[in-house]
Amino acid sequence: MQSGKMDHRITIQSNTYTVDDYGGVIYAWSDRATVAAQVIKRGTSEFIASYGIADKGIIIFRVRWLDGVNNTDRVLFEGREMRIKEVVSLGRRDALEIRCEDDGAAP
């Protein structure tokens, strides 16, 4: 993995929760790590939903190994929130490929 190709910054966030004074659960996203990333692929996936055809942005990031990243986390990139669809380990804890889906929602 060449560090010169990692010319983007992404923030990986985890969903956390706290309990308020009344016993209610409050969910929030907290920053887990901000790392250098290489954009491997950008594209659009078209699928048929119950309401018609929709486009989803697909993007794959390659980052250095970071333990515990999974598909319950999300990625912030260029002001967009992206759901993690799959995390693939490369080598022996050398790197991760994080495959994301852009819902089109800004934070």
Image (cartoon, rainbow, N blue to C red):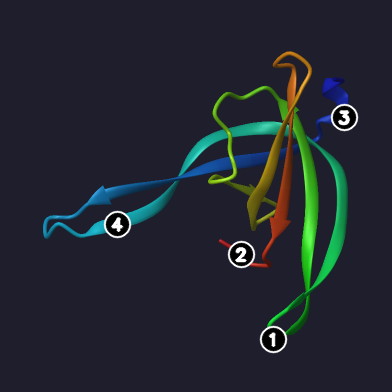
Q: The disc labelled 4 sits on which kind of residue?
A: Ile
Which-is-in-front pick, marks 1 and 4? 1
**Which residue position holds label 1?**
51
The Cα atoms of the two marked residues, 1 and 2, are separated by: 22 Å
**Amino acid under label 3?**
Lys
Disc 2 to disc 4: CB gap under 8 Å? no
Marks 3 and 4: CB-CB under 8 Å? no
Label 1 sits on a secondary structure element that is: loop
Q: What's the residue type where badge 2 is placed?
A: Ala
Q: Quadrant of residue 101?
A: bottom right
Nearer to us of marks 3 and 1 is: 1
The residue at 81%/30% (across/down) is: 6
Quarter holding residue 69: top right
Report the residue marked by disc 3.
Answer: 5
Disc marking residue 26: 4
Horizontal arrangement in the rendering, residue 23 relative to residue 100 (left or right): left
Q: Which mark is residue 106?
A: 2
As measured in the structure, the alpha-carbon distance from the residue carrying label 2 to the one carrying label 4 is: 20 Å
Relative to 33, say whether 94 is above or below. Answer: above
Q: Residues within 10 Å of mark 2 (few under 14, many from 20)?
A: few
Q: Residue flagged by tag 1: what amino acid is it?
A: Tyr
- Residue drawn where x is 33% and y is 48% of the image: 17
Give the alpha-carbon distance from disc 1 to disc 4, as whole Å. Answer: 31 Å
| Whole-percent x, y for residue 80 in the image | 66, 58
Tag 2 and tag 3, C-beta contact below 8 Å? no
Q: Is residue 32 left or right of residue 98?
A: left
Mark nearer the viewer, 3 or 4: 4
Q: Residue shown at 61%/64% (left/top)?
A: 106
Report x, y in % for residue 13: 52, 43
The local secondary structure at tag 4 comes to strand
Element type at mark 3: helix
Q: Whole-percent x and y of residue 97?
A: 76, 34
